[in-house]
Image (cartoon, rainbow, N blue to C red):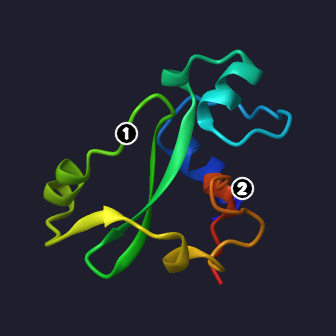
Amino acid sequence: MSLLRLRQFLDSYNIRYVVTSHSLAYTAGTIAALTHIPGKELAKTVIVKIDDTLAMAVVASSQHVDLELLREETRAKTVRLATEDEFKGRFRIAKPGRCPPSAISTE
C-alpha cells in the first residue's frame, strides 16, 4: 500500500492523523520519544499470519497485538506472529523492525 493509498483510506473514514518525519530509530518507543508523541498515539505495524495469509496489524506503539482476539474477529483457525523469513522480500524499502504501513509491496 502506498502512502497515498493509506492516506486515502484514513481520509475515507475521517480518521485524524499527522505525518511526521524523524531520525533513524529502531523501536516504536524510540520513535515516540524522538517525535514527542505519546506511545498510545503512535501506530506501529506487526506482521501476522492469519491461517496461511500474511497480514499487517496496525496498533498503538504502546500495545501488543491480541492474537486471540484477532483470530476470533477474523474467524481464522490460527493467528500468530509471522517470522522474518515469511515476510522478508515482501517490502520494497522497509527492513524487519522498520516497517511503516506505506512500505508494504502490492506487487
Can you give x and y, in whole percent of width and height, for residue 60 in the image?
47, 33
Separation (CA) of disc 2 from disc 1: 26 Å
Q: Residue at x 31, y 82 (%)?
A: 52
Residue 17 shown left or right of residue 58 in the figure:
right
Who is closer to the viewer here, 54 or 84?
84
Farthest residue in the right direction? 23
Q: Which residue is mark 1?
A: 64
Which mark lies nearer to you, 2 or 1? 1
Q: Position of residue 97 (x, y in %)?
A: 63, 53
Amino acid type, callout 1:
His
Callout 2 amino acid? Leu
Asked whether the residues under the numbered discs 2 and 1 touch, taking CB atoms below 8 Å apart as contact, a structural biologist would say no
Of mark 2 and mark 1, the one earlier in the sequence is 2
72 vs 85, nearest the viewer: 85
54 relative to 66, above or below: below
**Badge 2 element:** helix
Q: Which quadrant of the view contains residue 79?
A: bottom left
In the drawing, does residue 72 fall left or right of residue 83? Answer: left
Foreground residue among 94 and 2 = 94
Is residue 73 shown left or right of residue 83? left
Nearer the observer, 27 or 12: 27
| Quarter of the picture holding the N terminus | bottom right
Residue sitting at x 18%, y 48%: 69
- Residue under pointer 2: 4
The quarter of the picture where residue 30 lies is: top right
Q: Position of residue 56 (x, y in %)?
A: 46, 60
